């Protein structure tokens, strides 16, 4: 900002004050504060300054936007919606009864075509749409204490209605754990099965500090109402990574959660066969389920928004600065 | 209702009829402190609201966040105000204790005993020694002085620093020192009141001190609590009022707190936000219930029960109520209190408002109303002591038709007068005698023999001193015997009676007996209209009237002196009546005045004295500057019309002909006053559009009639006229005039220095007292006390204006930041199934209001939009404050819109940038919060006009502190946001998102502000530009003169158009005159509607400043 020399305009006042004090003794900062005479700089919105500022914003944000956009574009992702297609034709009219009927096999075989070379690691996400993990009733229904320390002594009233079953406490309690996503995916390329690494998909901090190593699932999914996946009661929560990922609730009704990683490159025109178990009920509320294979860049996954927004802001600034420049030339005073 | 005090009667005092002498100023006791203080705090609406919210939060079903996020700040705020109260009360307790435990000598069972002051009972005899403080209200019984006199200093009571004489009642005269222990009697006195100038009681002593007469007591016979005994070895008196029932105790009281216009506006805006909040809650509540019934039941994972409890419908609206409760910032009251006390401190600290003569700094007693100083529209000022120095100097006189001192301007140096004195001309001698002894002055002889005078009135002081310099020296007062030295001769007079001065009588007289020849003389002095009608029928008073006229023209204060010889029997007769009147309990003052009238007639007028009271330094400049600032001045004085007009002319109050015009309202009867009032009104209306300085002059009599019978016409006149001179007005009329202006919704400031201004000062929106020569009484009652009138300029233009600007910014900004975060919560509810989920966690919400956003804005108390010098040179700029341009519904709408816009920017960018795999709740919430914090830092930076180091530290330091605090929370495994901030800070996308939010949020704001600043500048902007370019940047020197001229052109219309157009109805709609929007924020008139467009465009101009 343009600054007018540390306010020499206050100089006049301070000399007269100095006289009042009986001589020009050096005044402390606190004295100046008391007299409201602290040296101040007063920025001015001069045309030059404002036009330069907007130019600068433009010249920073347009390249930044381009770089960001490029980073986003160079991420290859395959999004495949499977919820509708994985329902047998006979049940298309009544998907809910299909998904609720445990006797019908839920296997589903699909193939994905890779249209561009994908460099390892390739992240496998499942995406749910119109799923309100951020619903107040849902998001509160968990007990962090229990997840870390077990069922022993903690108040789990927040977990209702999945707190007790048959009078016994549920570990992990709450709606979030109860509704754990339970579709599974296996991938085959050509003849060989693609190895999917399902380790280290959760945050390390969560595993170490939020989910106990000695806390085992107890009495989980034993009720009349079965929500989502069951947990192996012999594996501590610390190692139940799917649960840990799921328990990181999403703030948006449409979200992706990490399922695993493929640690091989996929070449363009490769065809990947997916065997999936379509267990999770999104039909009753019209939610969508998608399988996403995506590489990653320095900005994360594919998301054009940031780049586009940067370019928009940058170019608006340039336009504004040009407008102000024209105005300045026209109404020069 | 009377009180009977039995003197020295241990039986009676044991009955405890009256309270003991324990002073208690405490508001609380240890036990009732908590309940009483809480009760007081909760009687405020805001606090009730916050308590309700906090209680609702305890219900875990509906609370979106941890209840601590509201309870924490609430308890903090309550603790702060409770601690302040407790501390004040503790200090009061300590000072009470000190006073109560002071040891005093009291007679008990006939023996003097040393007891604590709190054990004094009514009826006890209390002994005091020199320099003792008086522990309760006493009636004097005896003193060390043979004449029964004692001297007291009453500065703690009325602020007057001169010594006052008190005398023992005549019945007690001559009682032996030893016998005083045994004295018995009865004092019949009224019930306690707070009038420190009045004590109408009677005393009767019992045997053996039997006196047939009932002895009247006046205030002269009392010594009141908190006075000091001076120049008297000892004194004793009987306690009549004790404890909190003393005159001082009764006059103590908590004055009604004053509410500033800014506060009222903030309350209004808070109310509007509250209504808005209710609407939002209702809409969202209904939407939430609808969504729940249609959608949520399908979302099996939420497990909504089919049938909920009976209050189910209420749950979602209540959740939203809690979510939206942050719309009303809990911190605003605390921040405002804090900055207001800082404004007051700035006034106290200001070196330029220290009276260099006395070294007294200015002081803000009332710390809560500094903003009002910037919004003053009317100043009502006293004349004597306020505009003038109240240092009286005898300048001229006219003795039996001969004018002295006309040539030299100083009668003391006039050779003719000196000759006349030397030749002992009778009239001149009499004249000088009256000057010397017709007063209540006490001469005090110092050890070196020099005589100094203790006078209660500055006029008397001037006269006595002048007489002394004219060789008529008032040398000694010994009881009733006065000694006057004239050319080495000692003349003695015995004072028989003193007929005291009251503002109704406007004269005072003494009856003296010449000890040489035994003649009894009545000597009078007083205002011309009080003396001249009493002149003897044969005397020509023409010359005196002329003299008074002539002196008044010069702005001098005049007094007429007169005398008469009394016959012995005439005096006897009258003296009896006078004594009777003096001992009445009812209407004593009036009775005495009536009796005095019987004596004061047939006077021989000797001449006229003229006393000069010089204007204070800088008064004309101050008045001119403040008038340019659009402030209207009314002068209310007890002085004569001509003197008042002359003073008014000499201090720029009114302009001389032909530019100015004075309109007189006079008349003695109702009809005359009515006619002249109508005539003046007509002239006022017709000159309304001309740039002419029209002022009206009214005297006390006509004012009385006008206020009583023609209230409406007079009100109209008051609103039309920028200047008024009201002379010969009483204190209560002064207060009435303030009331009248206040009833027209004007902000009034009353300034005065004497006891007669106290009522006006207390009545006005802002009372300013001048700590002057008439004592500190006005300064004590006032909200601000200053040493000199000229400091008023700085008080209003600098302190008032800055305070207003700062508060306007601070309050609106507080709403802005609360609304910002609240809007984001509302938007978030639309993507979380309208279920009332909070995007932000409890820690963030609590810290947002308390730490992250309150510190940067607090340093805005250092912000200065313009330099002090610039404001002083262009006082017109005060108009923006007067008209409330910087804080009104439309500027507030601007801030509201800004917070909405910023909320959209933050919300849209963060949910899109952090979509899909990044959409983790805690991360997203921190991204949005960071966006808010960054934006608010830049908003404060953009709205700050001058950056000191402190501001940089607060704004940018706060931003850094935000990260440090959040890193700390992120390092705690138990906190919800464990590791979140570390993760985010490592992500390039986080920083890009934040910068994008800042650019997208601030770009339009900056562009808009720049556009207005450059192409639609307000007057403030123009001055800012000029100030900064015309300042040190000398390379622009060639443009400078041009620049300066344009400023003059731009600013000058303000000053020209200002005088007229008081009433907005007469406004030309498109005029650029600032008055066009002057009062339009007071809604209600249809006129506002037409104005609103212009208002909005205009006020938006200044909103960004």
Image (cartoon, helix red, strand yellow):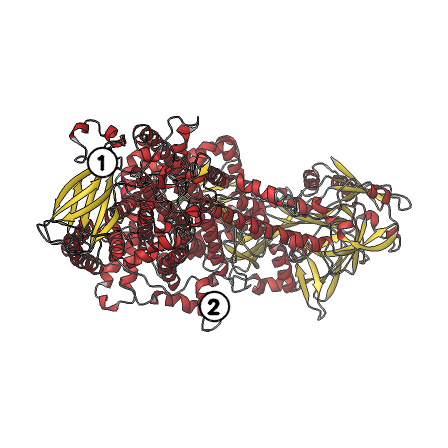
Instruction: Report the side of B487 relative to B887 (left or right).
Output: right
Q: Is residue B730 at least partly visible in the picture?
A: no
Q: Between residues B329 and A7, which one lies in front from this camera angle?
A: B329
Report, in whole angstroms, how far the alpha carbon at label 2 lies from the one at label 1.
92 Å
Q: Between residues B638 and A160, which one lies in front from this camera angle?
A: A160
Where, by quadrant of the figure, is residue B440 drawn? Answer: bottom right
User: Residue A106 bears which disc, if any?
Assistant: 1
SS at circle 1: loop
What is the chain letter for disc 1?
Answer: A
Q: Is residue A305 at least partly visible in the picture?
A: yes
Q: Nearer the viewer, mark 2 or mark 1?
A: 1
Where, by quadrant of the figure, is residue B948 drawn? Answer: bottom left
Q: Which residue is mark 2?
A: A20
What crowding class fits label 2: few (fewer than 14 Cα within 10 Å), some (14-19), or many (20 or more)? some
First-in-chain label (2 vs 1) = 2
- Number of disc labels: 2
SS at circle 2: helix
Q: Residue at x 33, y 63 (%)?
A: A41
């Amino acid at each position: 900002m343009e600054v007018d020399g540390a306010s020499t305009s206050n100089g006049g006042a301070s000399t007269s004050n100095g006289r009042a004090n009986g001589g020009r003794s050096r005044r402390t900062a606190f004295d100046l504060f008391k007299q409201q005479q602290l040296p101040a700089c007063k920025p001015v919105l001069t045309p030059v300054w404002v036009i330069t500022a907007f130019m600068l914003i433009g010249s920073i944000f347009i390249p930044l936007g381009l770089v960001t956009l490029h980073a986003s574009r160079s991420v290859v992702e395959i999004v495949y919606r499977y919820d509708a297609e994985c329902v047998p034709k006979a049940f298309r009219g009544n998907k809910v009864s299909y998904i609720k009927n445990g006797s019908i096999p839920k296997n589903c075989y699909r193939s994905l075509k890779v249209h561009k070379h994908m460099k390892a690691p390739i992240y496998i996400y499942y995406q749910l749409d119109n799923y309100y993990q951020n619903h107040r009733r849902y998001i509160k229904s968990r007990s962090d204490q229990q997840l870390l320390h077990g069922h022993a002594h903690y108040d789990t009233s927040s977990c209702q209605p999945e707190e007790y079953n048959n009078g016994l406490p549920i570990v992990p309690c709450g709606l979030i754990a109860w509704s754990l996503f339970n579709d599974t995916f296996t991938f085959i390329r050509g003849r060989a099965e693609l190895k999917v690494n399902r380790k280290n998909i959760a945050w390390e901090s969560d595993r170490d500090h939020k989910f106990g190593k000695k806390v085992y699932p107890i009495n989980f999914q034993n009720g009349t109402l079965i929500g989502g996946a069951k947990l192996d009661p012999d594996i501590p929560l610390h190692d139940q990574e799917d649960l840990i990922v799921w328990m990181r609730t999403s703030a948006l009704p449409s979200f992706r959660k990490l399922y695993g990683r493929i640690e091989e490159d996929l070449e363009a025109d490769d065809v990947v066969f997916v065997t999936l178990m379509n267990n999770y009920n999104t039909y009753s509320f019209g939610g969508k389920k998608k399988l996403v294979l995506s590489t990653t860049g320095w900005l994360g996954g594919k998301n054009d928004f940031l780049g586009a927004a940067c370019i928009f802001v940058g170019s608006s600034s340039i336009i504004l600065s040009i407008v102000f420049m024209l105005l300045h030339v026209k109404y020069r005073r | 209702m009377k009180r009977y005090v039995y003197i020295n009667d241990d039986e009676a005092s044991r009955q405890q009829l009256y309270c003991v002498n324990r002073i208690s100023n405490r508001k609380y006791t240890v036990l009732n402190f908590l309940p009483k203080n809480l009760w007081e705090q909760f009687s405020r609406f805001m606090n009730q609201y916050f308590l309700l919210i906090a209680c609702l939060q305890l219900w875990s079903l509906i609370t979106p966040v941890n209840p601590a996020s509201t309870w924490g700040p609430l308890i903090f705020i309550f603790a702060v105000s409770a601690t302040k109260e407790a501390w004040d009360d503790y200090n009061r307790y300590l000072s009470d204790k000190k006073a109560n435990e002071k040891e005093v000598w009291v007679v008990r069972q006939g023996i003097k005993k040393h007891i604590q002051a709190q054990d004094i009972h009514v009826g006890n005899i209390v002994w005091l020694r020199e320099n003792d403080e008086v522990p309760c209200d006493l009636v004097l019984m005896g003193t060390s002085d043979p004449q029964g006199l004692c001297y007291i200093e009453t500065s703690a009571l009325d602020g007057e620093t001169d010594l006052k004489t008190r005398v023992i009642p005549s019945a007690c005269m001559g009682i032996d020192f030893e016998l005083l222990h045994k004295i018995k009697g009865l004092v019949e006195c009224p019930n306690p009141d707070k009038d420190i100038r009045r004590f109408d009681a009677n005393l009767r002593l019992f045997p053996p001190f039997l006196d047939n007469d009932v002895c009247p007591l006046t205030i002269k016979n009392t010594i009141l609590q908190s006075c000091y005994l001076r120049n008297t070895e000892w004194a004793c008196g009987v306690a009549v009022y004790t404890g909190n029932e003393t005159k001082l105790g009764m006059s103590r009281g908590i004055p009604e707190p004053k509410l500033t216009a800014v506060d009222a506006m903030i309350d209004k805006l808070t109310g509007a936000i509250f209504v808005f909040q209710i609407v939002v809650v209702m809409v969202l509540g209904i939407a939430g219930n609808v969504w729940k019934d249609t959608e949520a039941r399908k979302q099996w994972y939420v497990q909504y029960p089919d049938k909920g409890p009976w209050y189910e419908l209420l749950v979602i609206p209540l959740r939203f109520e809690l979510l939206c409760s942050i719309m009303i910032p809990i911190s605003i009251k605390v921040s405002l209190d804090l900055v207001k006390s800082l404004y007051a401190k700035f006034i106290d600290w200001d070196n330029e408002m220290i009276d260099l003569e006395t070294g007294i700094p200015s002081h803000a007693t009332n710390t809560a109303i500094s903003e009002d100083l910037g919004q003053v529209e009317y100043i009502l000022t006293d004349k004597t002591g306020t505009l003038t120095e109240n240092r009286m100097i005898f300048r001229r006189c006219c003795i039996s038709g001969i004018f002295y001192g006309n040539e030299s301007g100083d009668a003391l140096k006039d050779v003719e007068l000196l000759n006349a004195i030397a030749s002992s001309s009778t009239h001149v001698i009499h004249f000088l005698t009256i000057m010397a002894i017709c007063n209540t002055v006490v001469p005090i002889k110092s050890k070196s023999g020099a005589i100094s005078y203790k006078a209660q009135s500055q006029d008397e002081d001037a006269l006595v001193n002048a007489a002394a310099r004219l060789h008529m020296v008032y040398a000694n007062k010994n009881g009733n015997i006065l000694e006057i030295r004239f050319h080495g001769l000692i003349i003695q007079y015995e004072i028989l009676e003193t007929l005291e001065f009251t503002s109704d009588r406007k004269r005072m007289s003494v009856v003296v007996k010449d000890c040489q020849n035994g003649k009894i003389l009545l000597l009078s002095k007083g205002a011309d209209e009080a003396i001249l009608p009493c002149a003897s029928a044969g005397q020509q008073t023409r010359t005196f009237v002329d003299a008074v006229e002539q002196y008044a023209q010069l702005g001098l204060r005049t007094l007429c002196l007169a005398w008469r010889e009394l016959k012995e029997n005439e005096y006897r007769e009258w003296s009896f009546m006078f004594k009777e009147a003096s001992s009445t309990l009812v209407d004593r003052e009036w009775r005495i005045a009536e009796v005095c009238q019987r004596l004061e007639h047939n006077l021989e007028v000797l001449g006229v004295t003229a006393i000069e009271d010089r204007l204070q330094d800088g008064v004309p400049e101050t008045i001119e500057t403040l008038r340019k600032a659009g402030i209207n001045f009314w002068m209310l004085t007890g002085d004569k019309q001509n003197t008042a007009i002359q003073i008014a002319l000499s201090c720029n109050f009114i302009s001389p002909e032909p530019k100015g015009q004075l309109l007189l309202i006079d008349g003695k009867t109702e009809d005359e006053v009515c006619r002249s009032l109508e005539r003046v009104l007509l002239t006022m209306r017709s000159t309304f559009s001309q740039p002419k300085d029209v002022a009206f002059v009214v005297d006390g009599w006509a004012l009385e009639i006008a206020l009583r019978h023609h209230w409406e016409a007079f009100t109209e006149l008051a609103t039309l006229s920028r200047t008024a001179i009201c002379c010969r007005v009483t204190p209560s009329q002064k207060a009435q005039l303030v009331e009248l202006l206040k009833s027209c919704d004007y902000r009034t400031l009353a300034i005065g220095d004497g006891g007669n201004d106290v009522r006006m000062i207390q009545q006005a929106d802002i009372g300013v007292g001048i700590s002057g020569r008439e004592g500190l009484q006005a300064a004590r009652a006032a909200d601000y006390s200053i040493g000199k009138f000229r400091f008023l300029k700085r008080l209003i233009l600098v302190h008032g204006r800055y305070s207003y600007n700062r508060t306007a910014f601070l309050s609106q900004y507080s709403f802005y930041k609360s609304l910002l975060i609240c809007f984001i919560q509302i938007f978030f509810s639309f993507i979380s199934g309208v279920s009332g989920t909070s995007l932000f966690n409890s820690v963030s919400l609590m810290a947002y209001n308390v730490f992250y956003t309150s510190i940067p804005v607090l340093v805005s108390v250092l912000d200065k939009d313009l330099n002090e010098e610039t404001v002083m040179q262009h006082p017109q700029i005060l108009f923006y404050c007067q008209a409330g341009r910087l804080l009104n519904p439309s500027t507030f709408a601007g801030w509201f819109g800004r917070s909405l816009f910023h909320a959209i920017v933050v919300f849209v960018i963060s949910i899109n940038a952090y979509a899909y795999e990044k959409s983790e709740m805690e991360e997203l919430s921190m991204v949005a919060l960071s966006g808010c914090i960054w934006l608010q830092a830049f908003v404060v930076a953009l709205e700050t006009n001058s950056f000191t180091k402190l501001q940089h530290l607060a704004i940018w330091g706060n931003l850094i502190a935000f990260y440090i605090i959040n890193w700390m929370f992120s390092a705690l495994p138990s906190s919800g946001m464990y590791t979140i901030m570390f993760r985010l800070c490592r992500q390039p996308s986080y920083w890009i998102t934040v910068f994008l939010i800042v650019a997208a949020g601030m770009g339009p704001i900056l562009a808009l502000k720049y556009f207005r600043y450059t192409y639609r500048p307000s007057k403030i902007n123009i001055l800012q530009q000029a100030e900064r370019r015309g300042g040190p940047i000398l390379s622009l020197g060639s443009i400078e003169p041009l620049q300066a001229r344009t400023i003059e052109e731009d600013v000058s219309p303000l000053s020209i158009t200002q005088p007229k157009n008081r009433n907005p109805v007469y406004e030309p709609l498109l005029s650029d005159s600032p008055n066009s929007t002057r009062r339009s924020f007071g809604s209600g008139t249809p006129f506002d509607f037409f104005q609103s467009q212009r208002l909005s465009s205009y006020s938006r101009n200044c909103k960004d400043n």
